[in-house]
């Protein structure tokens, strides 16, 4: 396994990995009817006033 020494690259890889896990979990929950809307869809449907 390669040790990543650059903190910027490490942060980018960790962020992308975390978002990938979040996306897969949200899609799986929607397919199993455990969630009605995922986060981005809910955010765009919210209306103010």
Image: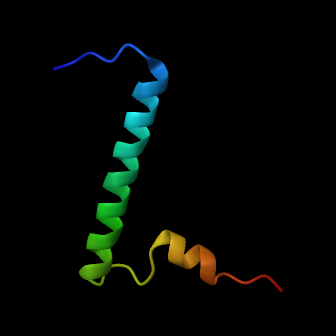
x, y percent for residue 48: 78, 82
| Residue 2 as seen in the image, left or right of residue 17 | left
Q: Nearer the viewer, residue 25 or 7?
A: 7
Is 14 displayed left or right of 1 in the figure? right
Task: Tally the numbered discs.
Answer: 0
Residue 10 higher or lower than 6, as above or below: below
Q: Quadrant of residue 22?
A: bottom left
Image quarter of residue 5: top left
Relative to 15, 33 lies left or right: left
Residue at x 43% of width, y 16% of height: 6
Instruction: State the residue lying farthest toward the left.
Output: 1
Residue at figure coordinates x 45%, y 74% from the top left? 38
Q: Residue at x 55, y 78 (%)?
A: 42
Q: Is 25 situated above or below 14?
A: below
Q: Residue at x 26, y 81 (%)?
A: 31
Q: How is the image coloured?
A: rainbow
| Rendering coords of residue 21 (x, y %) | 31, 53
Q: Nearer the viewer, residue 33 or 44?
A: 44
Quarter occupied by the N terminus: top left
Quadrant housing residue 16: top left
Q: Position of residue 41 (x, y in %)?
A: 52, 77
Q: Position of residue 13 (x, y in %)?
A: 38, 35
6 to 33, vertically: above or below: above
Q: Quadrant of the C terminus?
A: bottom right
């Amino acid at each position: 396994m390669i040790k990543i020494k650059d903190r910027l690259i490490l942060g980018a890889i960790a962020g992308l990995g975390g978002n990938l896990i979040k996306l897969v979990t949200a899609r799986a929950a929607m397919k199993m009817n455990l969630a009605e809307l995922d986060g981005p869809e809910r955010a765009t449907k919210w209306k103010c006033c």
